[in-house]
Image (tube, rainbow, N blue to C red):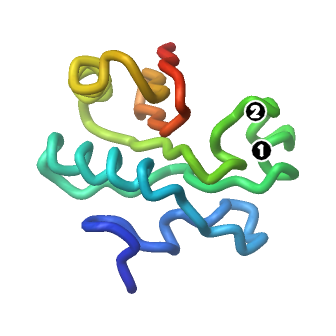
């Protein structure tokens, strides 16, 4: 599979509904590559690009402010989400969007700082 960044492939960016949307912002890819280097092992995004229909579906239940339909976000499942989240917040204290969840960390390249 052809890589679109140091560690990630286009197929890993694809919307989970199968619509064919598979783009990703280069800045988001760079953040994800840095996450991969921090954790020291392969990461397969559980969600990356999402079409608006899938993003708003009952399966996902996201909202219109989501960065996923803008192809600017990834959910990265890792063994220690807290460690990755803490590292991201320290590495980028004044920008980007990072969300901590039980099994993954959401990363996005929005232009303003957002944390949850």
| Rendering quarter of residue 100 | top left
Q: Is residue 56 above or below residue 32?
A: above
Quadrant that contains the N terminus: bottom left
The residue under the point 41% across, 24% down is 95
Separation (CA) of disc 2 from disc 1:
6 Å
The residue under the point 36% across, 77% down is 3
Q: Is residue 73 left or right of residue 35?
A: right
Location of residue 103 in the rendering, given as x and y in whole percent from the top left corner? 41, 31
* Disc 2: which residue: 62
The answer to whether marks 2 and 1 mark residues whose Cβ atoms lie closer than 8 Å is yes
Q: Is residue 78 above or below residue 101?
A: below
| Numbered disc total | 2
The residue under the point 59% across, 66% down is 23
* Disc 1: which residue: 55
Q: Nearer the viewer, residue 63 or 104?
A: 63
Q: Earlier in the sequence, mark 2 or mark 1?
A: 1
Q: Residues within 10 Å of mark 1 (few under 14, many from 20)?
A: many
Which disc is residue 91 wearing? none
Q: Is residue 50 left or right of residue 23?
A: right
Judged from the image, the secondary structure of the residue bearing numbered disc 2 is loop
Location of residue 54 in the rendering, given as x and y in whole percent from the top left corner? 80, 51
Q: Residues within 10 Å of mark 2 (few under 14, many from 20)?
A: some
Location of residue 74 in the rendering, given as x and y in whole percent from the top left corner? 50, 46
Judged from the image, the secondary structure of the residue bearing numbered disc 1 is helix
Give the residue at the far left of this rendering. Answer: 40
Location of residue 41 in the rendering, given as x and y in whole percent from the top left corner? 17, 53
């Amino acid at each position: 599979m052809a890589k679109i960044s140091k560690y990630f492939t286009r197929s890993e960016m694809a919307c989970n509904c199968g619509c064919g949307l598979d783009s990703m912002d280069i800045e988001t890819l760079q953040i994800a590559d840095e996450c991969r280097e921090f954790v020291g092992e392969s990461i397969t995004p559980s969600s990356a690009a999402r079409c608006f229909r899938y993003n708003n579906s009952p399966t996902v239940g996201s909202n219109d402010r989501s960065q996923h339909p803008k192809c600017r976000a990834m959910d990265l499942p890792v063994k220690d989400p807290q460690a990755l989240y803490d590292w991201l917040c320290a590495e980028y204290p004044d920008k980007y969007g990072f969300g901590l969840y039980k099994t993954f960390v959401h990363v996005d390249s929005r232009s303003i700082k957002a944390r949850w």
